[in-house]
Image (spheres, grey):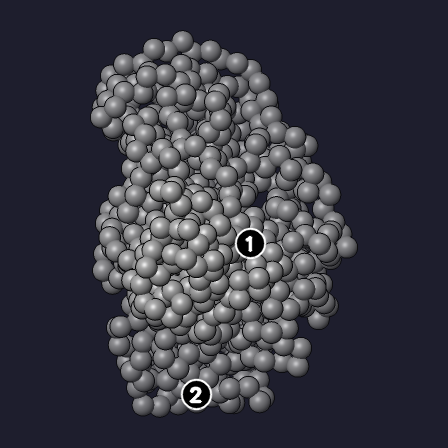
């Protein structure tokens, strides 16, 4: 999101000497843990989520994950550049960016602007259950300055997360939530969970610092984060020919695989380059400055440092108001600093002790940018440094600009990228072979006869392009000599687990070793088997293909039930000129349980990965998000490539019947690329834990009568569209608009574990609100702050407290619109009964 809307391995040939070592299967520092407080099926909430990371595979009920964000309501790329859609409403204390009635938990907040400097957003105020639990400058919060629980890794600034800032402190509430910023924040996401009831949920207390969690978090990415468990480790040496597979471990249960580790010295990664932070400016007008030269020169070499995220930069160059030529179009090397030298002719420089240089913008994919100029006078056939100019708003930059009479017109940007010079090993054969092995050697896992993991080696461990540093919560890659690739995802099984390595490449894997740690766990049987499982199988679902014009890339598209907990993504761009990284303009869109509206709708690909401005610092890794590689025209990448990952722990996305978790490629799914991804999730395919038991169509008189509908009559059919991947599909439905109460009866499953009402509404007017009662009993407030006049259809939900529906085969629903709020609209209601 650097651009503006203007860029619109059957026989295994393996030497095996198996060693069975009794060990602590989870040797991390976490203490043996008590069971999390969970009186129902919410799973761990609040800080218990991070105390009980062995419960990541818990299957929940009565939980939804949703998001507020600044996404372009028209479906374009204005996701925050102008702040057009950033405020849900403006209150006396600022811009409201999230608001919710009912119980829930704020799990992830992300912002960016001004290259990652969020100072101008002012303060963030978080109000939960009517109490202010956070009120401080956003920049101070993400810098860790306010302390308490708001420290790394639960907050990260733009230097730590490459252009974006993040807050991962889990903030629970029982009845209401509101998040406000002093000024319009431009780009933002607030991702939160909703609960059907408030049992086991307390209001977040910022003074209750979870010191145990903070202590344990210091080892995340280096050791197993789960509570310690007795186990055994199977260790094997590895050699693997092309086309062969190797069994790393067979385990018999019930139990869990708690760790998988590989040491592969044959695979090597690129040399680590030093970061260079440099502030600069960009324009679409002119920049001018005066520099010293040697009068005895035979010409002058003017060298500039620039950021090639803006490609094909062209500018006319003048010396003392005389045009001497044109900077040629730049060859994009986005992701690294770029350099360009122009030879100023002696006719314009000889005999002078100083010259005034002017660069006049001609064209570029974004703008002309400049960070540093070096001036070498050619004397006696050799260049001699006679001056240099540091451009930018830092104290050093401002002083240098003043000393050189620097001026700029039509400035479009200023900021401080922190990136490296182009690496010298772009075509190193060892690195290229390593990239092939990472791409085409697969990790395979089969549990109780079902293969649920088939993922490329690199991608599985968080680095699909090259061997790079990864230190995430549940997987890691250590590129240092003797380093290990580690996975700590808990993988449960009832009877049998098999872990394999499969070589689909044309290269042999000549050396290495593996360690697979398993532990016995009798409780897996009752939790993993049956119609209402409380634990899911671990899945790593991989796919690789070229992107399809006009359609989102699907990380996961499945019928079933489970929780989406993360993704490792490998993008290989096919764009050869211009903005060769335009695929990063794509937004994530997530649809759960048949909803036509996305529950999450983001603002850009690097934004989804917690970063910003096309990962404007460099590669990085935190427990929750990272970017392990970003090669440009080298290291096996033809153009521009990126390999980010994101874990969704508190903000895992549950689903009970289906999930479509996708991401655009480009502003409107228009950027060509090869995408590869591995989605991490727990659950079951072709097994549902909810079903639609009734639907009321307000445009159908017979349906109204059957459901004993009492309320506003529907008007003429509205023909409109839903937001998201299908925003070009026109849908016609009759809409009822009400300011007085409406009632209707819905069939539900008598054995239900809760019911969710789904409404299809006209969201032309925001902040529709109503009190809901079930069989005459108050059930809470249904508040919907969202509004969209471009795509007016919206599917939203209301979770009913299970105590109000348990044992019933039908419920009488009464919806009383809030006085003074926008009229309550509906075209359809559906009842989704949880099992």
Judge by depth and name the residue closer to the eye, 122 or 406.
Answer: 406
Judge by depth and name the residue closer to the eye, 118 or 350.
Answer: 350
Label 1: few (<14), some or many (≥20) within 10 Å?
A: many
* Residue bearing the label numbered 2: 737
Residue 390: percent from the left, percent from the top?
A: 52, 56
Question: What is the residue that sits farthest to the right in this orientation?
Answer: 207
Secondary structure type for disc 1: loop
Judge by depth and name the residue closer to the eye, 142 or 32.
Answer: 142
Q: Is residue 258 left or right of residue 50?
A: left
Measured in 3D between alpha carbons, the distance from the residue under mark 1 to the one under mark 2, in whole angstroms, is 45 Å
Judge by depth and name the residue closer to the eye, 208 or 466.
Answer: 466
* Residue bearing the label numbered 1: 158
Going from N to C along the chain, the mark reached first, 1 or 2, is 1
* Marker disc for residue 333: none
Asked if residue 107 is positioned above or below residue 363 in the image, the reply reads: above
Q: Quadrant location of residue 462?
A: top left
The residue at 32%/42% (across/down) is: 542
The residue at 32%/59% (across/down) is: 347
Asked if residue 286 is positioned above or below residue 512 in the image, the reply reads: below
Discs 1/2, front: 1
Numbered disc total: 2
Q: Quadrant location of residue 177?
A: bottom right
Residue 803: percent from the left, percent from the top?
A: 59, 62
The residue at 56%/50% (across/down) is: 159
Label 2: few (<14), some or many (≥20) within 10 Å?
A: some
The residue at 26%/43% (across/down) is: 638
Q: Is residue 28 visible?
A: yes
Residue 567: percent from the left, percent from the top?
A: 42, 46
Q: Is residue 694 visible?
A: no
Q: Is residue 727 left or right of residue 751?
A: left
């Amino acid at each position: 999101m650097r651009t503006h809307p203007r860029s619109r391995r059957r026989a295994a040939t393996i030497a095996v000497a198996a060693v069975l070592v009794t060990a602590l299967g989870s040797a991390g520092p976490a203490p043996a843990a008590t069971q999390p407080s969970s009186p129902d099926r919410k799973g761990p909430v609040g800080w218990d989520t991070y105390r009980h990371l062995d419960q990541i595979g818990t299957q929940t009920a009565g939980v939804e994950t949703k998001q507020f964000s600044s996404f372009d309501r028209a479906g374009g790329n204005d996701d925050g550049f102008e702040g057009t859609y950033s405020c849900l409403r403006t209150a006396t204390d600022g811009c409201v960016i999230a608001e919710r009635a009912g119980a829930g938990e704020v799990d992830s907040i992300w912002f960016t602007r001004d290259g990652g400097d969020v100072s101008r957003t002012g303060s963030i105020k978080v109000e939960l259950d009517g109490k202010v639990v956070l009120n401080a400058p956003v920049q101070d919060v993400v810098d860790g300055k306010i302390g308490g629980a708001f420290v790394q890794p639960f907050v990260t600034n733009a230097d730590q997360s490459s252009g974006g800032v993040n807050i991962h402190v889990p903030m629970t509430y029982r009845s209401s939530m509101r998040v406000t910023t002093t000024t319009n924040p431009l780009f933002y996401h607030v991702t939160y969970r909703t609960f059907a009831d408030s049992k086991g949920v307390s209001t977040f207390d910022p003074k209750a610092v979870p010191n145990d969690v903070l202590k344990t978090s210091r080892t995340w990415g280096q050791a197993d984060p789960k509570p310690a468990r007795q186990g055994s480790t199977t260790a094997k040496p590895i050699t693997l020919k092309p086309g062969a597979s190797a069994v790393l471990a067979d385990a018999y249960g019930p139990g869990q695989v708690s760790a998988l580790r590989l040491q592969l010295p044959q695979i090597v990664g690129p040399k680590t380059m030093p970061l260079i932070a440099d502030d600069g400016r960009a324009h679409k007008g002119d920049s001018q400055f005066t520099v010293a030269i040697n009068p005895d020169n035979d010409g002058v070499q003017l060298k500039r440092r620039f950021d090639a995220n803006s490609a094909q930069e062209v500018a006319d160059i003048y010396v003392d108001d005389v045009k001497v030529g044109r900077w040629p179009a730049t060859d994009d090397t986005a992701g690294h600093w770029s350099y360009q030298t122009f030879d100023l002719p002696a006719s314009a420089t000889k005999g002078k002790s100083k010259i005034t240089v002017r660069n006049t913008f001609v064209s570029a994919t974004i703008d002309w940018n400049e960070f540093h100029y070096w001036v070498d006078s050619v004397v006696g056939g050799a260049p001699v440094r006679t001056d240099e100019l540091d451009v930018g708003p830092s104290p050093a930059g401002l002083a240098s600009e003043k000393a050189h009479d620097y001026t700029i017109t039509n400035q479009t940007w200023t900021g401080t990228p922190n990136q490296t010079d182009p690496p010298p090993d772009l075509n190193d054969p060892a690195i290229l072979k390593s990239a092939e092995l990472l791409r085409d050697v697969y990790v395979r896992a089969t549990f109780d006869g079902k293969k649920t993991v088939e993922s490329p080696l690199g991608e599985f461990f968080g680095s699909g392009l090259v061997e790079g540093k990864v230190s995430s919560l549940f997987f890691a890659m250590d590129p240092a000599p003797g380093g290990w690739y580690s996975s700590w995802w808990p993988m449960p099984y009832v009877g049998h687990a098999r872990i394999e390595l499969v070589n689909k490449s044309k290269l042999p894997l000549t050396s290495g070793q593996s360690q697979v740690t398993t532990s016995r766990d009798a409780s897996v049987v009752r939790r993993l088997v049956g119609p209402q499982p409380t634990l899911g199988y671990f899945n790593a679902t991989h796919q690789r293909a070229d992107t399809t014009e006009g359609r989102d890339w699907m990380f996961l598209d499945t019928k079933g039930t489970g929780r989406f907990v993360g993704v490792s993504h490998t993008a290989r761009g096919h764009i050869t000129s211009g903005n060769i990284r335009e695929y990063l303009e794509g937004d994530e869109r997530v649809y759960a349980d048949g909803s036509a509206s996305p529950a999450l709708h983001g603002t850009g690909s690097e934004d989804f990965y917690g970063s910003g401005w096309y990962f404007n610092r460099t590669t990085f890794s935190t427990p929750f998000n990272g970017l392990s590689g970003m090669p440009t025209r080298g290291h096996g990448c033809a153009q521009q490539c990126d390999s980010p990952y994101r874990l969704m722990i508190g903000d895992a996305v549950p689903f009970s019947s289906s999930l479509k978790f996708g991401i655009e490629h480009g502003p409107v799914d228009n950027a060509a690329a090869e995408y590869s991804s591995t989605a991490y999730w727990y659950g079951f395919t072709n097994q549902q834990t909810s079903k639609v038991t009734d639907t009321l169509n307000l445009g159908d008189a017979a349906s109204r009568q059957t459901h004993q509908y009492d309320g506003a009559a529907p008007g003429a059919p509205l023909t409109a569209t839903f937001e998201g991947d299908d925003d070009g599909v026109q849908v016609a439905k009759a809409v009822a608009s009400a300011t007085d109460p409406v009632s209707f009866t819905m069939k539900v499953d008598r054995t239900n574990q809760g019911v969710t009402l789904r409404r299809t509404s006209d969201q032309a007017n925001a902040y529709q609100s109503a009190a809901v009662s079930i069989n005459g009993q108050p059930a809470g407030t249904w508040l919907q702050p969202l509004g969209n006049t471009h795509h007016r259809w919206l599917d939203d939900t209301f979770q009913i407290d299970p105590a109000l529906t348990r044992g019933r085969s039908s419920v009488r629903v009464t919806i009383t619109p809030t006085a003074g709020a926008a009229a309550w609209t509906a075209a359809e209601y559906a009842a989704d009964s949880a099992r």
